[in-house]
Image (cartoon, grey):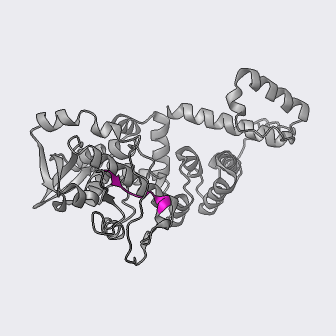
Amino acid sequence: MALIKNGKSHSPKKTQRGVGIDSGLSSAFQGAGKALTTNKRVISLPLAKIDPNPKNSRKLLIPLQEMQQALAVGQSGGLVYVDEDGDLNFPDSSELEEQAIDLVLSTPREKEFFDKIRALAISIYNHKEVLSPVEVSPNGDRYELNVGHRRWYASSLISPILGSSEIHAIIKDGGSLSASLRRWDENDKRDDLKLTERLANVSLIMGEYEEEYGKAPRQVDLVRLLGLTRPMASFYYKVLASGLSSDELEMIDDYQLNDLRTVAEICRLDNADHRMSALDIYVNKGTVAARNFVNHRLNSLEESPRNNAVTPPSAPAKPKVKKVAPTDRAVRSLVSIFKGAAPEILEGLDENTQDPGVILEFILNKLEESAHQSDDS
């Protein structure tokens, strides 16, 4: 949680001017002028009459009021101000510690959030007339955001400098499912949400689909609605159907275990203690080790229903496969092959590494990552 320290009276320190645009923002401005002139549903709404949507999976990690108080935007002695040349001065997260008023960002995600809001605020300041509208739905005498939470946040933050307390908005009366699908397009496809946030969004969409159509969505429906590959839809189903405990979800969230495929594999384990062990292995040893642990448990009598069945007397016993340790000569030959055929697999491998087991594990991890990326594309 972001904390704010009491500030002292001071003169604003000259900070680096923000002139860049967040790489993810270009599409927010593309074609905005046409939208504002041709779409009759685009209007100007007071920022104060718009509320964040509680169903939005992208969290506004720093409360707007706290940010406004800490930065004192446009106020005498504030950290965010327009200089004599008309440029907006807005410190980035690394510069906050140098200021007399501190906004304490306790996690990397809070720092990332701050810097993205900063970049968006600078872009809004520099493109006052070409701001892409947010999307809202009526909610009594107020409006609820569907899409554009950070644009609303950044606009509210620098409104004292802009001299405007309004924002362009598109009013849509669509049902909850269509609004959630638009939020998915805005957030999950374009941003780096944590896995727990994406799971919550998919779960919400599945519930709203069932409410609207009277039946639960199939995997093929998720593929169609969310633009997922079939394997990805299957992974979401596995995780959501597993009934993960709050402790398991907290571990996934705290350690940013964001590989959906690996978490879905872990959810194949019925035993909660074994799932926690697999998550711990994921944290300390990575995705491949975690999936190997899952496969080992599933092949044991305790976890796998298939192995609990009594083998008929006539059934031939399966031969045991002998495990062979990798030899230095064999692994070196494998490295030579990859150097010629697929050198990208060896990128990041320390040339001083001598242990054939370590080298082989590195290559297998890179091959797993490459296969996973192919599945997701």
Q: How many marks?
A: 0
Q: Of all residues shown, which one is farthest toward the front?
A: 84
State the image coordinates of residue 135 (x, y, percent, origin top left). Answer: 21, 47
Q: Of all residues shown, which one is farthest toward the top?
A: 340
Residue 187: tell me if it is visible: yes
247 displayed left or right of 121: right
Residue span colored magenta = 87-95
Residue at (20% x, 42% y) in the render: 129
Q: Nearer the viewer, residue 236 or 298?
A: 236
Residue at (65% x, 37% y) in the render: 368
Residue at (46% x, 59% y) in the render: 93
Q: Which quarter of the figure has residue 37?
A: top left
Q: Nearer the viewer, residue 263 or 75?
A: 75
Q: In the image, is residue 291 above or below residue 335?
A: below
Residue at (75% x, 38% y) in the render: 349
Which quadrant would the N terminus be assigned to in this image?
Answer: bottom left
State the image coordinates of residue 252 (x, y, percent, origin top left). Answer: 54, 58
Q: Nearer the viewer, residue 295 or 130?
A: 130
Q: In the image, is residue 367 above or below residue 302?
A: above
Q: Decide whether residue 362 is among the magenta residues.
A: no
State the image coordinates of residue 133 (x, y, percent, origin top left). Answer: 21, 44
268 displayed left or right of 56: right
274 displayed left or right of 25: right
Residue 180: tell me if it is visible: no
Q: Nearer the viewer, residue 227 or 91?
A: 91
Q: In the image, is residue 96 above or below residue 352?
A: below
Q: In the image, is residue 94 above or below residue 39?
A: below
State the image coordinates of residue 148 (x, y, percent, origin top left). Answer: 28, 49
Q: Decide whether residue 91 is among the magenta residues.
A: yes
